[in-house]
Image (tube, rainbow, N blue to C red):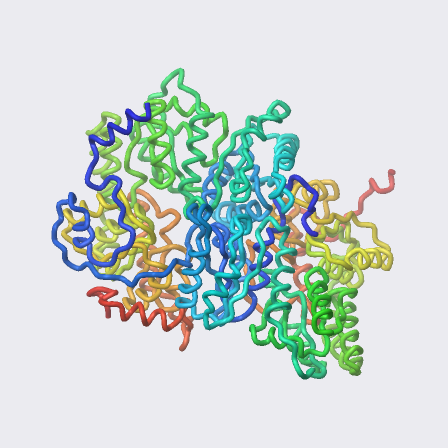
Amino acid sequence: MEQGCARSVIINPLKSCALVGALYGLVGIKGGLVLINGPTGCEYMSVGNLDFQDCRGYGEAKVACTDVGEMEAIYGGEENLRSCLIEARKVYQPRFIAVVNACIISIIGDDVEAVINELSLDIPVFYVDIGGFIGGMLDGYHAAADVLVEKVMKPQERTISRSVNLLGFMAGSYNWTNDLREIKQILRRQGVRVNAVITAGSTLREIQQAPAAELNVVVYDEFGTYIAQKMEKAFGIPYVGHDLYSPIGLASTSQWLSCITQQLRMDGQRKIEREEKKVKEQVLPKISSFGQVRLFRGLNTAIFADASMALSLTRFLVKSLGVRPVLIGLKSVGPNTDALLDSLLEEENLDPLILKTPDILDTKRALQEIRPEIILGSTFEKLIAFEMEPPIQTFVHISYPVWDYTIVADLPFLGYKGVATLVQEVLNARTSVLRISAIPYGRQWDLSRFEK
Amino acid sequence: MKEEVNSVTEETKEWYQGEVCNRYSGDLKGLLSLFKESGVTEKAGIRQVGEREGSVQSLGVCPLYGAFDVVMQIRDARTVIHGPIGCCHLQLGFHIRMVYGSSRPPDRTFPIAACSNMQENDIIMGGREKLQEAIITVDKELKPKLIMVLGSCAPAIIGDYIPDIIKEIEKRVSASILWLNVQGFSGRAPYTGFQDAYSILIDEVVEPPKEKLFDRVNILGEKSTEAGGEVNLEVMKRYLEAFGIKILTRFVRSTTVEQIKGMARARLNLIRCNEPGWFPAQRLKEKFGMDYLEYDFPFGFAETDRWLRGLGDLLGQKRLAEQIISEEQRRFKERSAEVKQRLEGKRVMITGNGGRATSMLKLCTELGMEICQLVYWGPIHDRPLLELKEYLEETGNNIDLQVSLDFYEQEALVKALKPNLFLGDPAHTHLCLDKGVSVDNIHQAPQVGYPGAINLAERWISAIERPVYDGWLYKGVPLHSSQKYVNQCLKDAAFCGRHRR
């Protein structure tokens, strides 16, 4: 469970509650409406967080709220929910409605299911029985996935050969739309068809037909593995990817891809080599010109992200750019995180400080103690690094939450295209600060290391 | 004591006091005629609007946000939210985006708040230990002078009694501890949260004055989300300086616990914004007999004159006030004539909450603009009703207005009316953009005083004369609700009044 279940105090929680996890899990499904059955603050705040980071385009799911107040807290909110469902159907004309409970409705114990059944609207209505207190975002996301697997997906008569479902995409993750597009493209070029993306980026119909895929592919371990296990149990679909690095950087992307093609009994090796060559041709001159690569060599780096992203990214930065990871913050951890972490540290002979589900105080202390030269993370880490004395200003946004940077262009972090994006971002974060600050161009060496 | 105050209000009750209009569509005379004692009897133009089953669109934060926002602005106070992590994370997110990101005063540091991380077990067993540990940790790690415990929905429903929980550990903590129950289900506006937080600060922190500082005033009710708030204050400081007055405490923007303690020494309280500021002004008057100026910081020329005259009256310097007014009028004469000429006849649709929308109505009328619709987001009561009546008497302008219009009814209105300019909230931007209508955000903090009015007018001229959105439109831009719903709204009997084009 994420965000330190046993802890009694969290200072600036870096992630939100189960309600938000369930909301983000459902809001990526096209054409629908997520109805938050709770007070208006729960909706206003979480939608604000979502839209600031990942503004939903036209035609994507909407979010509405039943505005539970004191009357509902005392007399129950079932009547209120009933009228709100009718109104939501009328105003938004959505393809489906997903009801998500906030703390208060979970505690007072409204029979939401009965309201939905009794009303029997002409569109699918389903409901996630969860309150914010159930756990962290990951728990909420899994609860939403439970509903999709158990209530939405239907057993399919035939299996579409060479087709996969992508598991673990969540609306509200930083840059997810671009990442998804890139992953779909590289799979298509391999001749693999993407049947459904769970839980973000598909329509409800596509999710209904997800069991027709030949293989489930986990993209992010902490989000996707749970769904893969559930689907294997319910529909017998095998899965891969859960014990691999997420497809970030050259080596991890190629390994991930060849694992899929092997599983589908396809020969993808030549195509993979072609893809790799294309990226290498694009990137190599940029990092070799005027010794740009020396800017990365041994660069003390801190990385804060969900485990699968953080580990895979660390691997790429170490293997392909030669940075020295000194601090890795794992904002949420999955079932295979420990195994991957161990193998990464051993494989690359690394010894960074590892923080698991840290809060802001843990993060601040670690940053002050270690003082990395570059940070890859979220708005939280950026702002505390900027306020340190002296500030650390070399920063790249890579993970939730990002509230101070808007994505407009279609640059992914994942896949082969993502290699170029990451090199560009890290390189420019480094050089732009060097050029405006008094820090000398090129790394200084630290004499104190020899005095110990 | 309380009864006495109540009986005084009973005797001096005006026609508008305690009155509320929940939902209305029609013209101004029609609205006023609904209140018998307003003196307006003409029943023209009341239209029936479609009944709704239940509202699913909220534009509101919760009371927890109100209280959180107040405490976050006090530099040496820290918040502990008693509830699940989401309550803390989401509040921080909003605060970082809206306050730290866009409108923070220069001395503000990165917002830090703690949370007791209530989980399923604590819902069953109670969150006593977790809250106690949270308070002790915050005291030890962050060393604040004041810790404010804010209870969210979950502890309120299960009945965690916060004062008892605090009492057990009070002696182990060096900061003073206050607490509030500000559960989100108690309202859809930050208003009650503001009220509760202000009133506990006034009751528990502000000390009775030992001396009076006759050249000092306090500023109440500055919104944390006010982008450009420091510039607005600069404008008002110049007016105050002209009266020979300085600011003692800003309650609570950028302030410290020490400053709050001594604030009752000031001569007067001035209100920045009515919504958060009216209540503490009354409370401070009840408790310490402090006078306050009832108008909030003024938008537009006429309101500025009224504000300066009001302040002059309170300070016993009427003649000085007139001098300042004529000096301002002289300084801005040419520029105001120019903007009026360029805005004259432009069709504007104004939306907002009570006080703000009414102020904008007056300014737009002053600038000679045609008000094609005035929309209140929620119910209106008390003061805005009075101000609307005064507006009608002064201008004779029987405008069309709507009360409690939801987001998508507004979308339908924009589509039907196609005004030259739409004034509203940032959330409305995409609603207008897609219809090729220029928009300006007046929600958080319009600029104040004469310079502010000129600045607003110039912004509007730019928005109208250079509608950049037009260049982005394409055929078939989707609606935010559904076409069917908008059509239904538009069919509704004379929904858009006589201004429909």
- Disc tally is 0
Query: In terms of depth relative to the viewer, which is nearer, A290 or B381?
Result: B381
Query: In terms of depth relative to the viewer, which is nearer, A321 or B108?
Result: B108
At horizontal 58% and vertical 57% (from top left) the residue drawn is A129
Query: Is residue B353 among the parts visible in the rendering?
Result: yes
Q: Is residue A436 above or below residue B468?
A: above
Left or right placement of residue B340 versus residue A393 in this view: left
Q: Position of residue A41 (x, y in %)?
A: 48, 50
Q: Position of residue B432 (x, y in %)?
A: 37, 64
Q: Position of residue B130 (x, y in %)?
A: 64, 37
Q: Quadrant of residue A54?
A: bottom right
At horizontal 52% and vertical 51% (from top left) the residue drawn is A105
Query: Is residue A435 among the parts visible in the rendering?
Result: no
Q: Position of residue A7 (x, y in %)?
A: 69, 42
At horizontal 69% and vertical 54% (from top left) the residue drawn is A332
Left or right placement of residue A369 versus residue B353 in this view: right
Which quadrant does the N terminus of chain B fall into? top left
Query: In terms of depth relative to the viewer, which is nearer, A242 or B321?
Result: A242
Query: In terms of depth relative to the viewer, which is nearer, A360 or B315?
Result: A360
- The residue most toward the top is B210
At horizontal 43% and vertical 60% (from top left) the residue drawn is A82
Q: Quadrant of residue B490?
A: bottom left
Q: Quadrant of residue B416?
A: bottom left
Which quadrant does the C terminus of chain B fall into? bottom left
